[in-house]
Image (cartoon, coloured by chain):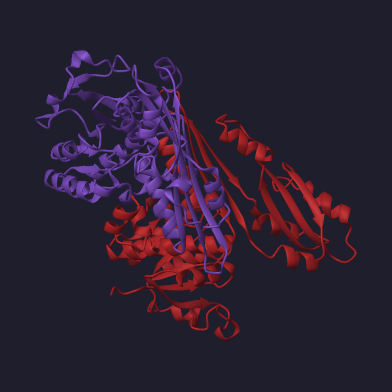
Chain colours: A red, B purple
Amino acid sequence: MKDEIRIGIVGYGRLGRGVELSVAQQPDMTLAGIYSRRSPGKLTALSAETPVESVAALEKGDAPVDVLILCGGSRDDLPHQSPRYARQYNIVDSYDHHARIPEHLAAVDEAAQVAQRSAIISSGWDPGLFSLQRLIGEAFLPEGKTYTFWGEGVSQGHSDVIRRLPGVAGAVQYTIPLESAIEAVEGGEQPELTAGESHRRECYVVLAPGADAEAVREAIVSMPDYFEPYQTQVHFITQAQLEAEHAEIPHGGYVIRSAETGGGASQLIQTRLALGSNPEFTASVLVAYARAAYRLCERGDFGAKTVFDIAPVLLSAKDPAELYRELL
Amino acid sequence: MKDEIRIGIVGYGRLGRGVELSVAQQPDMTLAGIYSRRSPGKLTALSAETPVESVAALEKGDAPVDVLILCGGSRDDLPHQSPRYARQYNIVDSYDHHARIPEHLAAVDEAAQVAQRSAIISSGWDPGLFSLQRLIGEAFLPEGKTYTFWGEGVSQGHSDVIRRLPGVAGAVQYTIPLESAIEAVEGGEQPELTAGESHRRECYVVLAPGADAEAVREAIVSMPDYFEPYQTQVHFITQAQLEAEHAEIPHGGYVIRSAETGGGASQLIQTRLALGSNPEFTASVLVAYARAAYRLCERGDFGAKTVFDIAPVLLSAKDPAELYRELL
C-alpha cells in the first residue's frame, strides 16, 4: 500500500472546514492536523479524530505534513503566509486578488525554490477552474470572445462593504447573471456587455436599531463600482430571517467562449458551475491541487506554479493507466 | 521575432482542411505543407499558397516540418501512421478507438522515445476536451457520477452503417441527447441511465432505385447496439434534399459531473459544446496540441502523451506571464 498524503490545514474558517470534509473523501490522503492561531482548546474540528494544533507547531519545519493547505484570506493572510510556509513546506493557496497574482507568484516562487518545495497558488474556481476554462477556450478557439458570469451566489466582498455602512447590522449580497446576457452569448452573438448588462445585485439587509432604511438603501445603490453600475435591489429583513434564509453559501457561474473557426462556423464552449456550497467546492479544488503539489515535489519540480502549469493527470488519485482506460 | 512553428498535414479530408483553416488563425504557426497519398496535382488546397506534396516527401525524415498533424481515420490510417511518423517527426493525432488507446499509446511512445520526438495522441473533443472535463470533474468531486451526452450532431459511424445497408443510396444519422435525461442530471438526481434513456437517433435516408422503404426502415431500427436500444426515427428523403439540407456537420454535447461534497452539498460542473462544424473544431484542438508537442520536444520531454499529461499553459500562443495576468 502506498503512503497516504498527509494534509495540514492552516486557518479554520469555512474554507478550512471544507478542506477537512474533502480530505475525508479522498482515497489517498489523511488529515495530519488543523493548525490554528486560536488556542487549540478553543477550536472544535468537525471530526473528533482531527488533531488540532497551534500554528506554532509548524515553526521548526518538522510538522508531519506533506502539503499545507492555506485557508486564510487573500487580503490579510495569504500575502505573508504563503511565502512564509513555502520556505518549509509544500503549500497550496486560493489567493484571489487577480491583479496581484504575478507579485504573489514571484514571492512564493522565491521561497519555494530556495527550500526545494512545491507550491500551487490561486487555485479554487475563480481563479482556478474558471481560469483553466478561459485558457482552454482561447487556445482552442483563438478568434472569439470569452465571457465570465458569476452567480447566482453570495459575493463576500460585496456583502462586506454593505456590512460596514452606518445603520447596517447584517447583510448578504447575491450576484445574479442577467439571463438576457447569457442568452445573447449562447446564441453566438458575441455582444459587447458592460458590467451592468451582465449582472444584477440583490441585497438582504438587517438595519441597526433606529437606522433610516431609505438612507441605507441610497448609500448602497449609489456606491461607485460596487453597486452604482448595476440594477441593485435592497430588501430589508430581520436578523432571524438573515440567519434562517441566508445561511447557505451557494454560488456558481459560467465561462463561455464564443468563436468562429476559419471556415466561418460558430463554435461555443460553455462551462457552468452550480455549487450548493462555495467553500466546500473551493476546498475540494484545493485538495486536488495539494495532490499535484505533493507529486511535483516528489519529482523534484520545485517552485511556485498556478493551475495553468499543472498537467491534469497530477490532480487525480487514479494511476495514469487507469485514467487512460476509463476516462480518455 | 520567434520562429514560427511549421505544421505539416498528413491526409486531406474534412479534418485536414480544418487544420489548414485553423493554422491560418494562429499567430505563431505557419503551414509547411499538405502531404497526401493522392498525386499532388489532383489535390487543391483551400489556400493557393499552401504547398501540396506527396507523402513520399516525408520518407527521409527531413521535411521542413516541426509537427505533423495526422488527419487520417482511426480504423485504417492512424494505427500504422502514428508510430511510423513518430519515428521521424513530432506528431499529433485524433485516435478515437477508446478501447484501444492504451495499445496505440504504447506503440507511438516506443517510436517517439527512440527517435527523441514528442507525440500527443487522441486529441480532439472526445477523446480530448471531453476527456479532460471528465478527469477534472472526478478529481475535484470524487463522490458523484459523470455523464457524457453527445449531440445534437452527425455520427459518422452510425451514418456509415446505414449507408452499407442494401437499398440505401445515401444517409446521415443524427445523435440527439434526450432533454429529459439532461434535465434529470442537471437537477442533481444522479439517475442511472441506459443508452436508450440518454439519446435518440434520427436517420435521413436516400433509397436506391427500387428499394423497399419498409424493409430498409426495419433493417435500421432493429440493428443491435447501433439502433435497437434507441428511439430511432427514419426519414426518407431525396438525394437533392440530402445535399441541400444535410451538408453541414454540426455536433456538440455535454459532460456533467454531479456530486456531493463532504458536508452534503450538491455540486455540479457542466461543460457544453455547440459546434457549427465538428471537423473545424476538432482540427482547432489538434492544432493547439501541436503547439504543445513542439514545446515538449524543445524541452527534451520525448515520447507519447495524451491530453491528460499536457499542462494547459503549453496550449496557448501567449507567454505564461501574459496568461497569469489576463486569464487567471
Q: Position of residue A213 (x, y in %)?
A: 87, 56
Image quarter of residue B108: top left
The structure residue drawn at horizontal position 87% and vertical position 53%, both measured from the top left corner, is: A215
Q: Nearer the viewer, residue A319 or A94?
A: A319
Q: Is residue B239 above or below residue A200?
A: above
Which residue occupies the extreme left position in the image? B60
Relative to A322, A257 lies left or right: right
Q: How many marks?
A: 0
Q: Position of residue B82 (x, y in %)?
A: 19, 39
Res A133 visible = yes
Relative to B96, B263 lies left or right: right
Relative to A98, B81 lies left or right: left
Res A88 visible = no
Q: Nearer the viewer, residue A56 or A297?
A: A297
Q: Position of residue A278 (x, y in %)?
A: 58, 60
Quarter of the picture containing the N terminus of chain A is bottom left
Q: Position of residue B286 (x, y in %)?
A: 32, 36
Q: Is residue A57 above or below residue B284?
A: below
Q: Nearer the viewer, residue B231 or A78?
A: B231
The structure residue drawn at horizontal position 30% and vertical position 14%, both measured from the top left corner, is: B48
The structure residue drawn at horizontal position 82% and vertical position 61%, both measured from the top left corner, is: A237
